[in-house]
Image (tube, rainbow, N blue to C red):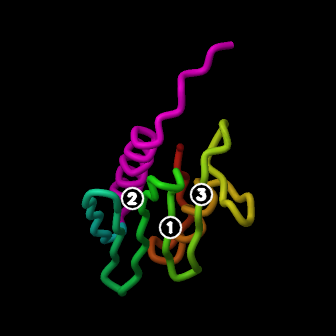
Amino acid sequence: MNRPEFNFEQDVERIFDVVIDTIDATDSDCDCAQAEATLTLSWPDGSTIVLSRNVAHQELWIAAREGGFHFRHDGTGWVDTRSGEALAETLSRVCEGPVGRRLTFRL
């Protein structure tokens, strides 16, 4: 089976769009700000989550109150380089506090 070639930049843009759409569909008062290589999610209580692309390493990084996470595409999906946790699961976990419930990110 022929799979389309992985395109880091396009996939990260798609992920940013999914994150924004998922957050926007909640009733949380989140400000989603995208600037060049980052997406910053900010809530009135001071909670902030930053997603940033690291082109040199072909990684997507997340900075959140729970810590820093680095994700690399393994050919089938984005996984944390240390824990092996899927990107969607980490996003659900770190957004749960500010949003007030678990979200499902369809990445």
Q: Would you name the residue on which mark 3 appears?
A: 71
Q: Which of the pair 94/11 is nearer the observer?
A: 11
User: Which element is circle 1 on?
Assistant: strand
Q: Would you name the residue on which mark 1 appears?
A: 62
Q: Of the numbered discs in the image, which one, if any, rests on residue 26?
A: none
Q: Residue at x 40, y 43 (%)?
A: 9
Residue 38 left/right relative to 3:
left
Span highlighted in magenta in the image: 1-27
User: Could you tell me the amino acid type at mark 3?
Assistant: Phe
Distance from the alpha carbon under mark 2 to that under mark 3:
20 Å
- The number of callouts visible is 3
Front label number (2 vs 3) = 3
Q: Residues within 10 Å of mark 3 (few under 14, many from 20)?
A: many
Up-down relation of residue 68 to residue 90 (above or below)? below
Q: Would you name the residue on which mark 2 appears?
A: 23
4 falls in the magenta region: yes
Q: Main secondary structure of the magenta part?
A: helix
Distance from the alpha carbon under mark 1 to that under mark 2:
16 Å
Front label number (1 vs 2) = 1
Q: Earlier in the sequence, mark 3 or mark 1?
A: 1
Residue 78 at x, y = what percent? 61, 48
User: Could you tell me the amino acid type at mark 1?
Assistant: Ile
Q: Earlier in the sequence, mark 2 or mark 3?
A: 2
